Image (cartoon, rainbow, N blue to C red):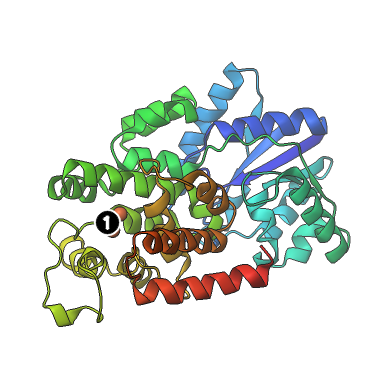
Amino acid sequence: MKSGVLGGTFDPVHVDHLYVAEKARLELGLDRVLLLPAALPPHKSGSVSDYPTRLAMLREFVRDAADRGVCLEIDETESEFRPCPSYAYRTLERLKEKYASDSLTYIIGSDSLFKFGEWKYPERVAASMPVCVYPRGGADGGEDGVAKECADMNARYPGARFFAMGAVSRGVSSSLIRFFAETDRLELASDMLTPSVYAYIKKNGLYRGYAAMVEKLKNDLPEGLFRHSLNTAEWAVEHAWLGGVPFDRAFTAALLHDSAKPFSPVSAKDAYPEGTADAVKHQYDAVTVLKTEYGITDPEVLDAVKYHTTARPDMSRTGKLVFLADKLEKGRNYDGIDRLRRIASKSLDDGVAAVLEHTLGYLHSRKETPDELTLSSYEWYNNIRRQNGS
Ligand SMILES: [Fe+2]
Ligand SMILES: [Fe+2]
């Protein structure tokens, strides 16, 4: 029997998983596709729904898929390793024993492929079974970029058989679904989920951990600024995978980035870096608001908010993400924004360089003086762009 193994966190499982499974079945001539939920994903920090909840959603999903004529099975091998972290090398070796008479193919997304070197014992994963990679779009260079990376993997790891599948992903992400649920608008994700999974999330009130935070922000900000904050968070969670930023960081930092704006400046003049314009001061005030009003302690979130207007050299991944999300969210509209969005959807570093260049050009045209940090950031990210040859 020919079986495909589609692993994932499935938090939640969504329609792209269905398309990938079906396309893999047809392209590879599989008899079945096994869905392999990760018990405790080592690469994911932040909050992940517990295993039984993700499993329950998968069961609903399998039933919905069967209604559409797609036959899927769930494999719970990873639950055997709980509470230890699950690692692909161990799971795949276990699957080979379990399905000894099967011909197995491991199916992964291109985002996983490009981080393959960071996996535990990648050489053991590569040698265990063929790996079929589906392009996730954006940063992976499309089908050609994925095919090239597969060839590099095959040259690097003895016995490796990586190959690319045709494009299939429609850009649905679990993070975006969580974003709509967290902001009490799950209905906007209804076409990203199968009917029973949608109903399960709604009935059980999943992904509502930030309900109080969202409600407070809604009460504290004027309507337009709250909408901008939602849009910024949407851009951030949608692009978080580019920088490997966990959902919680992307969501909280982007959502709260302007939380001090209506009240700023609140501190004495000398509390801000010399020469800081009034319009910029809210980025520094936001740190206090996040700490005192929202109980945020994560230094990466606080730092991202602190420099979301000016940027700073050597920002964290979250910092780059929030800086870009603020400038490129869907409510923004200015000359050149489409080009900037295209660049940023492929690389956060290139995106930051391009946005800073655009900002400096805009300020120059208005004869306004840029913030010192914006100037030094432009130097920093332009250097990176030059080094990358992009
Ligand atoms: Fe701002
Ligand atoms: Fe903003």
Give the residue type that dot 1 points to.
Answer: Leu
Q: Is residue 100 left or right of residue 21?
A: right
> Residue at 84% across / 55% down in the picture?
151
> Residue at 40% across / 64% down in the picture?
364
Q: Position of residue 283 (x, y in %)?
A: 26, 66
Quarter holding the N terminus?
Answer: top right
Res 257 seen here: no
Q: Is residue 27 left or right of residue 42?
A: right
Q: Position of residue 189 (x, y in %)?
A: 42, 31
Front in this rendered view, residue 163 or 21:
163
Q: Position of residue 357 (x, y in %)?
A: 49, 63
Please tell me in which quadrant of the rendered image residue 137 appears: top right
Where 346 falls versus 164 (above or below)? Answer: below
Where 265 falls versus 161 (above or below)? Answer: below
Q: Is residue 375 left or right of residue 388?
A: left
Please tell me in which quadrant of the rendered image residue 258 appears: bottom left
**Disc 1 on helix, strand or loop?**
helix
Q: Position of residue 333 (x, y in %)?
A: 39, 42
Count residues near mark 1 (Cα–Cα under 10 Å), then give few for <14, some for 14-19, many for 20+. many
The residue carrying mark 1 is 256
> Residue at 42% across / 60% down in the picture?
359
Q: Taking the image as four quarters, which one is ligand 2 found in? A: bottom left
> Residue at 59% across / 59% down in the picture?
86
Q: Is residue 207 left or right of residue 13?
A: left
Front in this rendered view, residue 104 or 293:
293
Front in this rendered view, residue 98 or 369:
369
Please tell me in which quadrant of the rendered image residue 277 appears: bottom left
Res 335 seen here: yes
